[in-house]
Amino acid sequence: MRRQKILIMGAAGRDFHNFNCLYRDQKAFEVVGFTAAQIPDIDGRKYPAKLAGKLYPKGVPIFEEAELTRLIRKFEVDTVLFSYSDVPHEHVMHMASIANTAGANFMMAGARATMLVSRKPVIAVCAVRTGAGKSQTTRRVCEILTASGKRVVAVRHPMPYGNLAQQVCQRFATYEDLDRHHCTIEEREEYEPHLDRGTIVYAGVDYERILRQAEQEADVVVWDGGNNDTPFFRPDLHITVLDPLRPGHELEYHPGETNFRMADVLVINKMCSADPEDVAIVYDNIRQVRPDAVVVEAASPITVEDPKVIAGRRVLVVEDGPTLTHGGMTFGAGVVAAQKFGASALVDPRPFLKGTLVDTFRTYPEIGTVLPAMGYSDEQVKDLQATINASDADSVVIATPIDLRRLVKIRKPCTRVGYDLQEIGHPDLKTVIDGMRRRRSA
């Protein structure tokens, strides 16, 4: 019987997990390739034979998404599996139309079909959009569990942008581990804040293997989601973060809406900075779609290392990269800090862009007058450093989750902006976590 030919559309993360869950060692299917989007320089690689299994002794090639029509026709693809996140529903259906026009079926895997079952309790923290506040919510969950005496391991959504065969299962407990695994800025931004608080982090490519290893040293596994993707592990408690600065997006983006509909707990973040009218839109959508969900209100107040570096100065603001690019935000905590502490002006980075950052702004022209901390490769890190130092700013406001000064030599006065989650009133996260533990012990 002819094997069904599958082409997986991805962005170096969910696509590999879907392959492992649905197609690896399955003789009824032949995955002819992956396509790559969102992340620069991930096409042209291969999903290695070491990970792909015995049916793919040469591995599985990764192509540019722009080749979708040609690939469907060349390989006589039966089904295209859409496997990446944080895109408008309209984008997904455009891809479906392209696939259907070329003669292929189009599908998305159900969340349940790709969730691994843990032997330990799992709390999943997800979001409806990149930049909603998922990371600080995850840190808050880990803090609550640790304070109650639980051994906590955070498992981060994949970011395997390097050598896939060497990134099968990664464990991070120290900064030296970050160096040993050659982590990008994007990886460090997610891992370092956990390490600063004594939380062990796992990530990689093969999440069955990652989960089994993490279970050996955890009382509770915390799934630290990426973008607005759904959990890779079946959660005992599913927390989804909503962003009232982007009201309505909880019903407009894939697969964020799935997280919105699946969640046990909805955290409305940024309550202190959002307009009341926008908060009302979010609440109205909750009433219509998830009236049974527990709602936790929260804020992410900023702290600034040295406000004098901002006051009265022309500042270059460096923000978290993914939040500005496929997250679609035009500002973050750095801009808020610049306004709060009296910067005389925001310096537009565009006249000073170097190398790969020129391409970034060409791809995402809506970024505007802030600089995304792009660091998917050593070349991008060098270009980021050159751009910062070439600017005519008086000082630099670093609003990335890590101290960028560890990786980039900045020849200007600079200060860091931090932010942590603070719940407002009740219920709070401790209440809902305690409720989960009581249900499990009953």
Image (cartoon, rainbow, N blue to C red):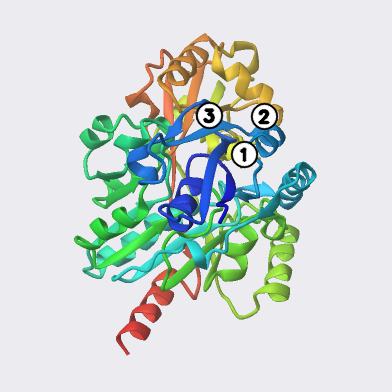
Labels 2 & 1 near each other (Cβ < 8 A): yes
Q: Residue at x 49, y 39 (%)?
A: 12
Of pointers 3 and 1, the one earlier in the residue sequence: 3
User: For the residues marked 3 and 1, what is the alpha-carbon distance in whole angstroms?
Assistant: 18 Å
Of pointers 2 and 1, the one earlier in the residue sequence: 1
Res. 64 image quadrant: top right
Of pointers 2 and 3, the one earlier in the residue sequence: 3
Q: Position of residue 315 (x, y in %)?
A: 55, 22
Residue 285 position (above or below residue 92): below
Q: Residue at x 73, y 70 (%)?
A: 284
User: For the residues marked 2 and 1, what is the alpha-carbon distance in whole angstroms?
Assistant: 8 Å
Crowding at dot 1, Cα within 10 Å, few <14 / some 14-19 / many 20+, comes out as some
Q: Residue at x 21, y 40 (%)?
A: 174
Which numbered disc covers residue 43? 3
Which numbered disc covers residue 326? 1
Residue 312 position (above or below residue 300): above
Between circles 2 and 3, the one closer to the viewer is 3
Q: Position of residue 425 (x, y in %)?
A: 50, 71
Nearer-the-camera pick, 28 or 268: 28
